[in-house]
Structures are given as structure tokens and as C-alpha cells.
Amino acid sequence: MDSKPLVAIIMGSDTDLDVMNEAARALELFGVPYEIDVSSAHRSPARTSEFSRNAASRGIRVIIAGAGGAAHLAGVIAAETILPVIAVPIAATTLGGLDALLAMVQMPAGIPVATVAIGKPGATNAGILATQILATSDHELTKKLLAYKQKLAHGVEEKSRRLQEGRAK
């Protein structure tokens, strides 16, 4: 793969960076080039619209959008692009991210947004899901994902073995 970004990670505020860095780490694990930026559906709607309309022509193939609270970022982006959009709900209010999750999964018919779990686990899964989307047309990514799944399975087997050995004593 070349270094031209294929995935855009965008967040509504720089306070979301701690969570969204997990998506970046997942992409790095598979060698997927990405860009990362801040844009707000509410505070910078023109910037968000321009990003959405121009992402595909810049070579972006998947967008990961993280936001908390009203969490309109992913939906606003999805309304202006045909690229796959993956939403990461962030716990930014006293509702613990449930508000963001509900906002993200309640998209109207015709504006799909894939939504993952709240917070860091969701951001990790967003990076992996973006990689899986790209792997549908990239054999090398497919091999990396298969190896990753095998590593996960071996990890479970190892934990089971240690547990059983500990109980046998």
C-alpha cells in the first residue's frame, strides 16, 4: 500500500482525540494509511460539508467519524458522500455516550451510518471495520486480517490453557 490516506478519521472536538487515537492504532496495525482531523457538524458546518464532498476525490475510501452529545457529525458527513461512514459514539456528557449512540443509530432510510460501540473499544472496531471494507479489494489486507483473527483465537486458547492448568493444581 502507498502512503496516500485511504481512511479519514474525523472528530467533532480535539477532546475526542484520546478515543479516536484507538481507530488510528488499529489502522496502523494493518498498515492502512489514514488522515486525522477535527470538524464539527455544529460549530463548523461549512468545513464539515466541504470535507464530506471532497473526501472521495482526494482518495479517501472510508470515513470514521467520532462525536459525543448530539453526535450529528457522522450523519452530516454521510448525507454528503457515498463513501462508507463508520460512527464512533463518545461519552462526552453525563449520559455516558448513550445519547451519542442513539443519535448515530437513528439515521433515516437512505443515509446509512455503521455504528460501533461507545468509546475506545468502538474506535478500535471502527479501525478494524474500515480495514475489512478496504480488504474487499486488497488481497494483502485480507491476509493481514486473517492473521489477526488467528492471533485472537490463539490468545483465547492460551488463556483457556492457563486457566485449566491453574485449576488442575
Image (spheres, helix red, strand yellow):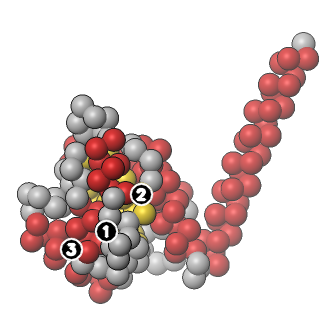
Q: Amino acid at mark 2?
A: Thr
Residues packed near mark 2 inside 10 Å, few (<14), some (14 to 19) or many (20 plus): many
To which quarter of the image does residue 155 belong?
A: top right
Q: Which mark is residue 108?
A: 1
List the residue tagged with mark 3: 51
| Foreground residue among 91 and 135 | 91
139 over 156 or under it: above or below: below
Q: Which mark is residue 85?
A: none
Q: Amino acid at mark 3?
A: Phe
119 over 58 or under it: above or below: above
| Foreground residue among 158 and 66 | 66
Q: Which mark is residue 115?
A: 2
Residue 156 point in image, percent of width and height: 74, 40
Q: CA distance from mark 1 to mark 2?
A: 14 Å
Residue 136 point in image, percent of width and height: 58, 78
114 over 88 or under it: above or below: below
